[in-house]
Amino acid sequence: MWIREESPDDIDAIHDLVLAAFAAVGVPGEGKLEARTVDTLRADHALAVSLVADIDGRLAGHVAFSPARPSRDGDGWYVLGPVAVNPADQGHGIGAALVRAGLRMLEEREANGCVVLGDPAYYRRFGFRPDPLLTLPDAPEGAFQALRFTDAASAGEVVLHAGFGHHENDWMAGP
């Protein structure tokens, strides 16, 4: 398996992969929603990190990281998601490898931290924890978590790109 940054040739395959991965979870419409999120982030130049897991020339997984902004000292923050693995390749550590590679890239860029909205049991392995200083409106209890890379005093409500459907904002929309 080779983890690499996405290329223009990967865009359609990423879309199809995200559709398939989230359709497999059995929540109606989830695949379309997540695929649309990735497409919107890309179109708005808001994919700060977009990695694929390439196995012999086919995409087995994808992870996206885009800017996020806490209301206080909010520079240098990112949100992880979505992460998607082809249903036939799940359970082999592909998603974990993608997440770890992306987090390393953020640390190398001297990011202050990363947030995620997801299963606490899954994301805890990467160091994510609920952070009482950072909030996301309407997030289920315990599902919004943060991983701080620095001792920045970042706090408050975290604003995500509008593609996530949380809050309208123009600061991350790009050109």
Image (cartoon, rainbow, N blue to C red):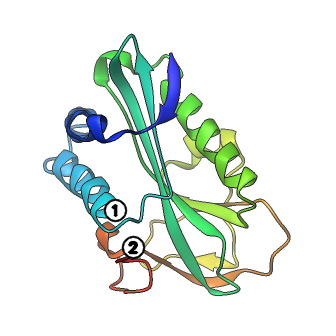
- Reply above or below: 31 against 43: above
Q: Residues within 10 Å of mark 1 (few under 14, many from 20)?
A: many
The single residue placed furthest to the right in the displayed view is: 151
The image position of residue 117, as x and y in percent, is 48, 59
Label 1 to label 2: alpha-carbon separation: 8 Å
Q: Amino acid at mark 2?
A: His
Where's the C terminus, which quadrant? bottom left
The image position of residue 148, as x and y in percent, is 75, 62
Residue at the image point whose x is 37% and y is 39% from the top: 7
Query: What element does badge 1 sit on?
Result: helix
- Reply above or below: 38 against 90: below
- Reply above or below: 157 against 108: below
Mark 1 or mark 2, which has the lower sequence index? 1
Q: Say the numbered circle drawn on residue 107.
A: none
Q: Residues within 10 Å of mark 2 (few under 14, many from 20)?
A: many
Asked if the residue under mark 2 is in contact with the one under mark 1, i.e. CB atoms within 8 Å, the reply is yes
Nearer the observer, 159 or 76: 76
* Whether residue 142 can be seen here: no
Residue highlighted by disc 1: 41
Q: Is residue 16 left or right of residue 138?
A: left
* Whether residue 11 can be seen here: yes
Q: Is residue 125 left or right of residue 78?
A: right
The image position of residue 126, as x and y in percent, is 68, 42
Q: Quadrant of residue 152?
A: bottom right
The image position of residue 66, as x and y in percent, is 48, 62
**Count of marks placed on residues:** 2
Q: Amino acid at mark 1?
A: Leu
Query: What element does badge 2 sit on?
Result: loop
Residue at the image point whose x is 21% and y is 56% from the top: 36
Residue at the image point whose x is 54% and y is 22% from the top: 93
Disc 1 or disc 2, which is closer to the eye? 1
Residue highlighted by disc 2: 161
